[in-house]
């Protein structure tokens, strides 16, 4: 599996829209370490985006 497929599977799983066919493909063809790395990276990016959004909102509110 390529990085693009791993990324798309990770995003689909994170948002709960992963198809059964894609899930089966991931478990039979993909390396667990790729999905673990993609999941950790997605989580870190998600947290950083949330922190950035909160900072922007607080700055615009004058807090």
Image (cartoon, grey):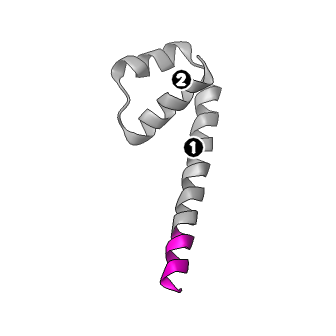
Q: Which residue is mark 1?
A: 42
**Residues at marks 2 and 1, CA–CA distance in whole angstroms:** 14 Å
Left or right: where does residue 57 sit relative to residue 3? left
Left or right: where does residue 60 sit relative to residue 34? left
Q: Which residue is mark 2?
A: 5
At x 62%, y 42%, the residue is 41
User: Residue 61 at x, y = what percent?
Assistant: 48, 82
Image quadrant of residue 32?
top right
Q: Nearer the viewer, residue 60 or 43?
A: 60
**Is residue 60 one of those drawn in magenta?**
yes
Within 10 Å of disc 2 (Cα), the crowding (few <14, some 14-19, many 20+) is: few
- Against 54, is 17 above or below? above
At x 64%, y 35%, the residue is 37
User: Residue 42 at x, y = what percent?
Assistant: 57, 43
Badge 1 element: helix
Q: Mark 2 or mark 1: which comes first in sequence?
A: 2
Image quadrant of residue 52?
bottom right
Within 10 Å of disc 1 (Cα), the crowding (few <14, some 14-19, many 20+) is: some
Q: Which residues are magenta?
A: 54-63
């Amino acid at each position: 599996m390529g990085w693009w497929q791993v990324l798309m599977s990770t995003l689909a799983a994170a948002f709960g829209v992963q198809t059964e066919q894609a899930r089966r493909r991931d478990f039979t063809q993909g390396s667990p370490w790729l999905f673990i790395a993609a999941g950790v990276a997605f989580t870190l990016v998600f947290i950083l985006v949330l922190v950035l959004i909160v900072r922007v909102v607080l700055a615009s509110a004058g807090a």
